[in-house]
Amino acid sequence: MAAHTLPAGSAVQPLTPEEARAEILAAGERQPPGWLLPLFGMLAIVGFGWFAVRVASGDDPHPWRIYLQNLMLFTGIAQGAVMYTVAMTVAKAKWGRPVRRLAESFVLFLPVAFLLSLPLYGVMDQLWPWVEHPVEAKQAYLNPGFFTIRGVVGMLLLFGLSLCFVYHSLRPEVGRLRDSVQGRRRDVYDRLSAGWRGDVEEAERSDARRTLLAPILALVFAVTYSLLAWDYLMSLDPHWYSTLFGAWIFMSAFLSGIAATGILVAWVPRWLGLERYWTPSHRHDQGKMTFAFATFWAYLTWSQFIVIWYGKLAEDWPYLLHRGQHYPAVVIAMLLLVWFIPWVGLMGIAPKRNPVTLSLFSGILLLGLWVKLWLLIVPSVSPETRSMLGLDELLVTLGFAGLFALTTTLFLRTFPVLDTRDAHLIVPYRPIQPHP
């Protein structure tokens, strides 16, 4: 196998495949800054502590609305990032080799998201109006029992397949590396590689399983996430419906996974001292994906709006009219943050290659998707609420963010941040030469 090469004139020496694997594995032993994990833990404790106090202190359902909002946001990021790797597998995208493991790092939040979803079924009357005021024409579908079954079974199926997909990505690597790690990592590696059949057979078996699972998972994602969108979000206003709504929500989740992956691509290599594997060309590719799917999100949003606006049907138009009349600033903020600002900011080559601008506009996009979920949830069940700048919004969001960051950090400290089988295959960045 050819050694890993670097651009001509680089002061850093090329690495052999064995040296590249050792370097990546050693990076996982590096400890994050001492303040980082306590910060994430404090955010989670403060956020969920505030939520618990608010729920216990009265009958105000608003904390549950913000809880639902953040559950959908961070679940969407984790699931969307897994689907990002699924798309790479289906497309056989070689450019995504260094990106794939970073996207997979969000997968540990999915079991947490499932557990966090369970309390919602005990407070359905505080969130979904059809529980206390059934819609006769939809009662066969919108009833607490069937709603709970759909949510629990759908999440178990989708999250289970996602974990299985990532497991088959990790297994060939942890089996080969288990003798190189110690302590907690060794225990995890031994469990994941139980029944080891040898490097070659395991690699072939893993690739075959991932190739089989990828299209299945894509279909399950589209169907299951559409059901979650209809149930958790669209049924908040049980008299309104849209056939495009499910696709809009699951593509929003896909976009959020891409954007969150972009933040890791921008900074994790620098924190771990592995810049040779994530070059400006990789950030450029990641920026193009963010730019493209933000524009696709805008296309779906326009498609949703124009049909309702043009038809002005009695059951459709009030949904948009209420938000346009009473929440114009929130609507404008959503469009600016999710699409226009990232679209302008990531236009051109330089902003995509720069880690600061890539992470900045990816973060702005995620903030816009948070605003979008607030706009979908709160006006439907609490029309009198006008501001999204309250302590519930701030602290509950920080609690979810802290928990999400903890699960991601746990993954990145346990597994190599890059598939060591591919380390020597990554083509480093070569500056584009200007035309004469």
Image (cartoon, helix red, strand yellow):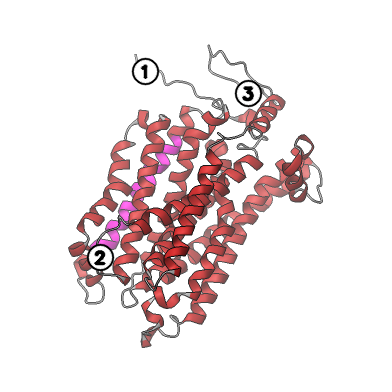
Alpha carbons under labels 2 and 3: distance apart: 53 Å
Determine crowd level at label 3: few under 14, some 14-19, many 20+ residues with C-alpha closer than 10 A: many
Please give the name of the residue rendered at 45% of the width and 61% of the height, measured from the top-left corner.
51
Alpha carbons under labels 2 and 1: distance apart: 46 Å
* Residue type at tag 1: Pro
Secondary-structure class at tag 3: loop
Please name the residue that numbered disc 2 is placed on. 307
* Residue type at tag 2: Val
Residue numbers of the magenta segment? 285-308
Left or right position of 176 against 279: right
Left or right position of 223 against 425: left
Please name the residue that numbered disc 3 is placed on. 4
Residue 434: which disc? Answer: 1
Q: Position of residue 418 (x, y in %)?
A: 61, 36
Please give the name of the residue rendered at 33% of the width and 49% of the height, measured from the top-left corner.
338
Determine crowd level at label 2: few under 14, some 14-19, many 20+ residues with C-alpha closer than 10 A: few
Q: Position of residue 65 (x, y in %)?
A: 39, 66
Q: Is residue 94 visible?
A: no
- Report the magenta stretch's main SS: helix
